[in-house]
Every structure is written in structure tokens, then in C-alpha cells.
Amino acid sequence: MRIRDFWKTGVLLLAFAGVFCWIWFVERKQEPKPEGEREKVAVLAVDKAKAKEISLAAAGADAIRLVKEGDAWKVTAPFAAPADASAVESLLTSLEKLEANDVVAEQPPDPAEYGLDKPGRTITAVVEGAPAPLAVEFGTKSPDGSNVYARAKGSPKVYLVPSWVEGSFEKKPFDLRDRNLLKVKRDAVKTLEITGPGESYALARDDKGEWVFTRPVATQAGRWSVDGLLGTLESLRMDAVAAEDARDLKPFGLDKPVRSVTLGLAGGGTRKIEIGSSPEDRKYHARAASSTLVAVIPAALVDDLAKGMKELRAKRVVDVVTYEVEGVEIEAEGKKTVLARTKQKDSEGLEQEKWARTAPGKKDLERSKVDDALFKLTGLEVQEFVDAPGADAAYGLDAPAATVTLKREQGKPALSLRFGKKDGAAYARRPGDAAVLKLDPAKVDEALKAFKEL
């Protein structure tokens, strides 16, 4: 063989060797097979019921340490605070059965190839009964970025783990602290006291479970509007911490709070939140009374409170939905009419609702006509609240044009109204309510006529 031919053969062999090495290197770090063609591989298994401590360490970030004390979790580093139970539960769920898409190398000669010589993120769990802490280390991402290289600490085996799994551990300390300022459930609230610019008022649940104002006037509150405010208070979460331990409240406008809400709870005890200045648009400083932590909260609560007492008043003469009504009694023009809703089974055994007049005289009624009359009545809205009314005679309420009583289902208390007319105006009054309600006379006539025709 000529030397020139031998040289060509050698070059070809070197080229093949290079291709083989490249294929071998890529195959070692290849992406996992499609989902349907592979089995998940366990990387770490943490019994979350026995977990006592979790640590999250990431390059360039504060290390986070969470410790379980009794049944509650607490953040102990980089600061001390109660932890968010749901956020900790999410971390534990991710650790409970951490699985990989594939095994890349059983005994890699150089962990640096996978960024595991200096892991970018390490998650450690102390588990009751385990001889040593359990930890997982995350290295660099795979070529297409959809996976990340990982290993159980102390084991040489390298896995490919979906990038979203590592992302579930990408937390800042604030993400894991309990951001609930009031820690209250709306059903536990029995009284509300609210102060704001130029306004102060109080509400309470009466013995029937209905919300009423107790100050500055004893009058009915709107069940849905009060429930909406309670929902805002229940879900109130801080957006940031302005100061962990503020000894001087003046910089936050909390030495003289602009607004405050005090909640009286079932079984005794109170919760109070004070609201101060606005550090930026749509944000406010706030703190739970007696706490030195000053939080930044979103504007939702302030927006609700800024609407004032008028927003929480019962703007409809009867705050009830028609499907709750099971009976109606109307006294007008010296006559009493009684309507009743019943449930009967038809020929096919299906339950049907029916309305009937039981007095004077018995008569089956068209359900649509009764529903229409109820819609007209429950849709009557207050045009004006007369909070310091004179005698009933000034509103025609001493000799009512009509008295309507709605009987409700499920043991709820009946609702009664007296309607009066005076000088072309229409009024109504609820039992025990200090206010007189001024209404649209045409709409009152329309509602009463609808019942009269039944």
C-alpha cells in the first residue's frame, strides 16, 4: 500500500473515531424518551408526615430554613415568622416522591459536566426516623432546557428531572411566610366596628343571624354586602413587609391610623387591623393591632371601606331571594291574603313546586305569576334613608296601605314590611328598624297590584 493511501485511511479512521465520541457524549446526556416510552425513576422519597425540617439553599440567595413546632411550621431563617401551611405542604408534596425522567449516568467521572460539583440548588429534609438528612441537588439544565440534572446527595447517580420540578423549589423567604394578617373566618365574626375619614359605625349579628347596624342608627344591613366585606377581610394577605419590628409607627401613618376595622369573634376575643399611609399606588401600610410588624397590603380592603356605611346598608326593602320564600301574607284594604308554596310529586314521581292561595278561598296559582309578584317586591330599592324619622303618621305608616310578611324556608325568620303613602310619596318600614325607607311610588303600586291580582 502506498504511503499516500495509508495516510488517507488514517484520516478516515480518525474521523470515524470523532463521530463515535460525539455520539457517545450526546447519548450520555440525551433527553429522555417520549412520555409513553419511559418509566419514572425515584430520586428521593420523603415521608411528609414525618418531616421535621426543610432547608432550601440556592446560589446567590438567602438560605431558607423551616422547622415544624407541634402541628405548625415556622420560618427560622433568614428571619423568624410563622410559615404558610399551604406553601410548606406544597414543598413536602414535591419532595414526597421526587421522580426523574431518566438516569443519565450511574458513576459519572466528573460531576462538573452536569453542574453538580457546585449545585445551583439543594433541598434538604430532616425526617423523623431517618439516620441522616435527605437531600437532593440540582445542577445545570439539559441542552433543550426542559430538564435539569440532579442527584440525591451522597449518591453518584445523575438523573434528568423535569425543569418544572426544580421550579417548585424556587422560593423566596417571603413566599413561605404566613401572610395572613387577621387569621379569621367570616362565620366566626359577630361584630364589626369601622372607623374612617369622618365616619364611624358598628354592626352586629342579631339573634336571628342577620346583620344590623348598631351605631349610629339601628337599621338593617345588606346581607350580601356585609358578607363581601367579611370575605375581603378573611382573604387579606400582605404583599410585602415594610418593617419586621417597627417601634416608630409615624413613618407608616400608623401612629394615627386613617382607617381601622375591629372584629368581635364568637366565644370572645377580637381582631383589629389598622391602615395608614400609602407607600405607592394601590398599596397601603397596615398592621394587626398590638403587632410591631408593618405590612404592605393591596388596595381591595381600602376600596371597600372607602365606600362607607351606605355601601353596607340594605338597599332593597327585603334582602331575600325569591327561592327562599315559602309563604306570603298580605293585609291590604281590610283583607288578608295568604299564599303558600308546596312541593308535590307528579304522575311520574318527580317533585314539582306549586303555589296556591289558601285564604280567602283556596285556589291554585300560576307559578310564573307568583314569581313575578315576588320579583317586583324583592326588587324594590330604597331611594332615601330617613334615619331620624318623625311619627309614623308623617309617612302614612300609622294606617299602612299594605303589610306584607314573607315566610322563609329552612327555619329562617319571617320578614315583614309596612307600606305607607303620604303626599304622593311611598314609604316602608321594617320591624325594629329605626329608619324609614323612601321608595318609588309607581314601583310600590306595581308590586302590590301584582299580589292583589293573585
Image: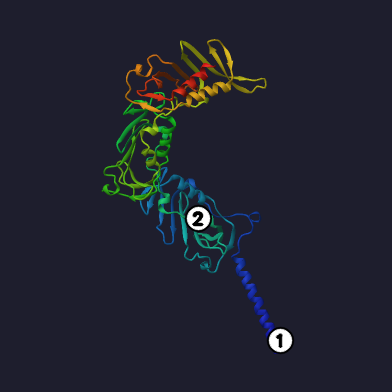
Identify the secondary structure beneath mark 2.
helix
* Location of residue 341 by image quarter: top right
For residue 352, above or below residue 359 = below
Residue sitting at x 47%, y 49%: 129
Picture coordinates of residue 273 (x, y %)?
A: 34, 40
Left or right relative to 259: residue 316 = right
Label disc, if present, on residue 44 of the rendered structure: none
Q: How far apart are marks 2 and 1 (CA)?
A: 57 Å
Residue sitting at x 50%, y 13%: 337
In this view of the protein, which residue sits in the foreground, 247 or 281? 281
Q: Name the residue under label 1.
A: 5
* Residue 12 shows in this picture: yes
Quarter that holds the N terminus: bottom right
Picture coordinates of residue 319 (x, y %)?
A: 45, 27
Q: Nearer the viewer, mark 2 or mark 1?
A: 2
Determine crowd level at label 2: few under 14, some 14-19, many 20+ residues with C-alpha closer than 10 A.
few
Residue sitting at x 47%, y 46%: 89
Picture coordinates of residue 402 (x, y %)?
A: 44, 16
Question: Which amino acid is tagged 2?
Answer: Gly
Question: Which amino acid is tagged 1?
Answer: Asp
In this view of the protein, which residue sits in the foreground, 71 or 454? 454
For residue 44, above or below residue 185 = below
Q: Mark 2 points at which residue?
A: 167
Numbered-mark total? 2
Question: Farthest residue toward the right?
Answer: 1
Q: Are marks 2 and 1 in contact (CB under 8 Å)?
A: no
Picture coordinates of residue 374 (x, y %)?
A: 51, 23
Identify the secondary structure beneath mark 1.
helix
Quarter that holds the C terminus: top right
Q: Earlier in the sequence, mark 2 or mark 1?
A: 1
* Residue 407 shows in this picture: no
